[in-house]
Each structure stands twice: as C-alpha cells, then as structure tokens.
Image (cartoon, helix red, strand yellow):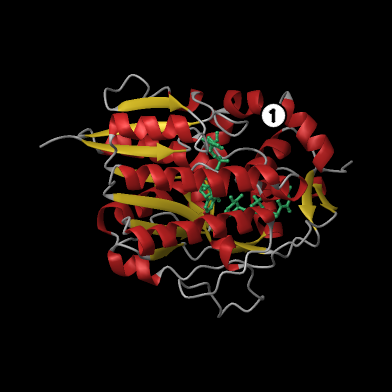
Amino acid sequence: MTRKKILVTGGAGFIGGNFVQYMVKKYPQYDIFNLDLLTYAGDLTKHKSIETKENYFFVKADIADREIITSLFKKERFDYVVHFAAESHVDRSITDPGIFVQTNVLGTQVLLDASKEVNVKKFVHVSTDEVYGELEFDPSTFFTEETPLQPNSPYSASKASSDLLVRAYNETYGLPINITRCSNNYGPYHFPEKLIPLTISRVLNEQRVPVYGDGKNIRDWLHVIDHCSAIDLVMHEGINGEVYNVGGHNERTNLEVVKTIIKELGKSEELIEFVQDRLGHDKRYAIDPTKLETLGWTPTYNFETGIAQTIQWYLDNKEWWEQIISGDYQDYFNKQYIIS
Ligand code: NAD
Ligand code: TDX
C-alpha cells in the first residue's frame, strides 16, 4: 500500500500545530507535510517532539504564493489537504483587515486551484462558527449547518468568503471537500493574544486582565484535542460536500472564564479590568454538533478538567509563552489596550 500524503497548512500555529502532532503520532503510515509561513502566530519550537520523525516534513511558504504552491503540489501530489492557515485574530482584523482578505480568501483560492490540478482526494477546510454571526442570549438557540452566513467582523467575513469558494469548487469542478465550523478552542500552544492564554499569562505575572464591555458575551469552548479528533474523522469519513459544526456544549461568559482562571491560580479578582468593548462584538456563539456526533464523534473533555490541565500546561511551559510575550507582542498589546 502506498503511503498517503497529507498537507496540513498552518501547522506551526495553535490548532494546526496540535493537529500535526496528533496525526504524526497516530498515523505512522501517513506522511504529514506542515506548510506554514511562520508569521507572528507560527513557531516550530512546539514541534521538538516530532521534528526527527520520518513521517514529518516542514515547508516554509505563503499559501497565497501561486507559483510556489502550484509547483509544490505538482511535485508532491498530496492525497489530502487540511487547511488551517489563516489570520485568526478578530481584534487584528478590526485594525488591519487587508491581510485577512489576502491570506484567508486569496490564499484559500490558490490552494483550491492547486488541489484541483492534482485531483486531491479531499480538501478539508477548517472554518469557524463566527461565519454564522451572533446569537441572542437565549440558551435554547444554536448554530446548525443550515444557519445562514452573517459574518460581522472582517475576520469572519474573510472566513465566510473562503467557505463559499470551497463550496463553489465542489459544485463547479467536483473537487471533493468538507467544511468544518468549530467553536472557540483552548489548550496547549494557544497564542497569548486570545482570551484564555492572555488571562493565564497576565494573572501569573500579577498584571491586570482586560475584559471587554461588561464581560457577559458568551463563547462555546472546545478543547483543541477534541477539535483534532473531529477533523481526523471528517477527513476520513465526512460525506463529500458536507459542512460539519464542531462544538462541545461548553458555553461560558467571558467573565466566568476569567474568574475560573483567577480562582485556579489562587489570585485576586481585583486583577479584572473592564475595558472598552470590541467593535461589533458578537454577543453569543453556541454550536449544535448533532450532525458530527451522528458521524461518530464525541468530545472527551469537560471544560473544568480541560481548563485546569491547560493552566497546568502554561505553568509547565513558561519558556514558550514568555518568549512570545516579549518583543513585538508588547508593541501589539500597548497599541491594543488602554489598561492600568
Ligand atoms: P493561529 O493564528 O494560531 O495559527 C495560524 C497559522 O497560520 C500560523 O502558524 C501562521 O504562521 C500560519 N499562516 C498565516 N498566514 C499564512 C500564510 N499566508 N501562509 C502560510 N501560513 C500562514 O490560528 P489557530 O487559532 O490555530 O486557527 C487555525 C484555523 O482554525 C484558522 O483557519 C481559524 O480560522 C480556525 N479556527 C480557529 C478557532 C480558534 O478558536 N482558534 C476556532 C474555529 C476555527
Ligand atoms: O483581552 C480580551 N478581552 C476580552 O474580553 C480578549 C483578547 C478577548 N476578550 C473577549 C472577546 C470575546 O468575546 O473574549 C472572547 C474571546 O475572544 P478571543 O479569544 O479573541 O476569541 P474570539 O474573538 O471569540 O475568536 C476565537 O474563536 C473563533 C478565535 O480567535 C477565532 O480564530 C475563531 O474563529
């Protein structure tokens, strides 16, 4: 049996990085190619445990660079593409939307063209629940795969645009695809610009934690390893052309999340500072994952265990995030927040 070649884009980032490690370890019979531009959000130090494995390969490239991507696909003739690479931070999309269109929309189109040329068996597009817009604070309402797309931020608009291109390549050219739309992830290697790792790192340094608005906005949290198992299942078993929502029924207000972390670390809630709200801040996200559960997926983490393990991981891996929050990150933080 010939070995399968899997291209993972964005495999130096948070979720893609966890997925690359999960796949390299679980499937020694597959060759896993990690393609990443190593932007501010990507780093390879996280892959020390797999970098010498025979089934792991790294390519530094921009997904929007048509020439390089086309020739790479012609050379390697990938069987599967799992596409994570993106600009992923909503706040950055509000201050600088252009790079979100460039990477998330045009970059996806370049990958779709290259995938079509070499007849990949499946293109799995990793998208987000944010493409559906926002829900009201009514706990009986959820996003399903039929919910209309109503993205509110430049980030989610760029992701929705890429979803539509992926759908169109399936309808028009018959490219086999799946789209996954996941809720907020948390876990190891989460970049400290996002709420959970930002809170953990700042509380550990006795610094104030910026909570937007009144802190009552709700997110639906999923451990990154449960997201990895969902994508593994969709890649192998997903029905061609279908969209699958991924979520673990873990809704929390932002304030609840921040207070949980402060309590776990034994610090004072006086570290909380309410700051100016995010522009166009979506109220609530909540996923109905029934369709994926019917395919055979079950999440394994509850939020309380998952967050405790994640906090412990940040305590055990200080050198990873301390190196990130120095340098350029400080400039970003000082521009982004007015905080005491
Ligand atoms: P991340 O920002 O941590 O990582 C993104 C990775 O993409 C980085 O390694 C970066 O270097 C790489 N990248 C960026 N531009 C590139 C380019 N032009 N060419 C090649 N590589 C490039 O993001 P993440 O949080 O791991 O998210 C991964 C994917 O999952 C994204 O598509 C995101 O929209 C989606 N998603 C994220 C979440 C979440 O909670 N983080 C939830 C649902 C969906
Ligand atoms: O300092 C902060 N204070 C705060 O109150 C930050 C960074 C965030 N927040 C709030 C905004 C959100 O309501 O916390 C919530 C979570 O914010 P983020 O961690 O920035 O995530 P979110 O905007 O919900 O988007 C995430 O989930 C969906 C990912 O970044 C996206 O890539 C994914 O698609």
- The answer to which quarter of the image holds residue 4 is top left
Task: Reply above or below: 159 against 50.
Answer: below
Task: Reply above or below: 274 against 339.
Answer: below
Residue 117 shown left or right of residue 96 in the figure: left
Check disc 1 and report its element: helix, strand or loop: loop
Residue 2 shown left or right of residue 70 in the figure: left
Quadrant of the rendering where the C terminus is positioned: top right
Residue at x 52% of width, y 38% of height: 64
Quadrant of the rendering where the N terminus is positioned: top left
Residue 33 shown left or right of residue 156 in the figure: left
Residue at x 45% of width, y 52% of height: 126
Q: Is residue 302 visible?
A: no
The percent position of residue 272, horizontal first and vertical second, equals: 79, 49
Residue at x 49% of width, y 66% of height: 249
Q: Nearer the viewer, residue 169 or 130?
A: 169
Q: Nearer the viewer, residue 97 or 90?
A: 97
Give the residue type at disc 1.
Answer: Ile
The percent position of residue 300, horizontal first and vertical second, equals: 38, 55
Q: Nearer the viewer, residue 302 or 63?
A: 63
- The answer to which quarter of the image holds residue 284 is bottom right
Q: Residue furthest top?
A: 52
- Location of mark 1 (residue): 325
